[in-house]
Image: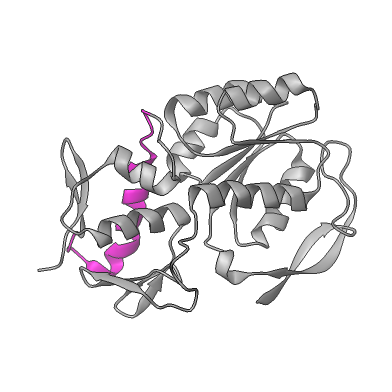
Amino acid sequence: MSTCAVCVDRALSGRLGKDAVEPFEQVLVEVDERRIVNEKVLVVDDDARLRALLKEYLEGYGFQILTLADGCSVMETIRDESPEMVILDIMLPRRDGLEVLKDIRTEYGVPVIMLTAKGEDADRIVGLELGADDYLPKPFNPRELLARMRAVLRRLHPEPLDRPETSDECIEAGGLTLNLSRRTLLVQGREIELSATEYKILEAMMGRPNTVFTRDQLMNIARGRDAMAFDRSVDVHISNLRGKMKPFTGDRELIKTVWGSGYKFVEAP
């Protein structure tokens, strides 16, 4: 366990939302490092102060936070950045959050938690019917949002019950070492940082080298549920993995594209 100073409201008992953001002060919050796997989260809200607060608060728990002030570039950001989760406000300028959610669900299986200043059941029901994974009305306590985010991520990436935390069980293939308990990748003695989705994909492929995985199979493995039919964000994850390994592997391509089928991890000669 380590201690991290996180900027939050006066006693973390305040609530966040439009016209409800209180002044902040530094408090010490204990963070369990074993739960930090560097998930990338996109926060979409037109309240600049709320975006800044959530960015600072959630980054204190190991998340990478991207922010947008409206819904116009959400699809492009998901395509380019491939976040593990989206926090989406319903009341957005220019494009309604429910419209944005509908667009997301036509192409991506990324989990979405909806935020809204309204508390009506109709908004909550419509959001859930459109495919939202959870719903949080404003004003809210940041700890509740964090708990809901972790609950969604646990459903998508459940911890194996039969693997002791102290185990150093590893997968070694192609000159790489993937530590399953620490969720770290070692190449030539150097540790490479992976997102949660990248780790899941690489764990599956290294565990079965030379096996062809379709895009849908990899997204189901990474997301823990059936991927949307047009979800092609796996291509971004594969590209990111290749980019992270290239400085160490050079021209040796370990993840090969099988045209018309998907991808496979190949052993080094």
Give the side of residue 267 with respect to residue 117, left or right: left
Residue at the spot x=19%, y=46% of the render?
257
| Front-most of residues 60 and 224 | 224
Judge left or right: residue 77 versus residue 128. Answer: left
Count the marks: how many?
0
State yes or no: residue 174 in magenta: no
> Residue 94 location, x and y as percent?
66, 21
Q: Residue at x 86, y 45 (%)?
A: 21
**Extreme left residue here?**
269
Q: Residue 79: x and y, percent?
A: 44, 37
Q: Residue furthest front?
A: 162
Q: Is residue 95 visible?
A: no
Residue 174 visible within the image: yes
Q: Nearer the viewer, residue 49 or 2?
A: 2
- Who's the residue at 45% across and 33% down the image? 108
Residue 42 as seen in the image, left or right of residue 211: right
Instruction: Residue 231 in the image: state x and y as whole percent.
Output: 38, 33
Q: Main secondary structure of the magenta part?
A: helix
Image quarter (top left, top right, bottom left or bottom right) of the C terminus: bottom left
Tell me which colouring the rendered structure shows.
Answer: one colour
Quadrant in which the N terminus appears: bottom right
Residue 173, horizontal then vertical, whole percent: 22, 68
Q: Is residue 141 left or right of residue 166?
A: right
Q: Is residue 129 above or below residue 178?
A: above
Q: Which residues are magenta?
A: 229-253
At 69% from the left edge and 52% from the top edge, which residue is drawn?
146
Is 244 magenta? The answer is yes
- Figure quadrant of residue 51: top right
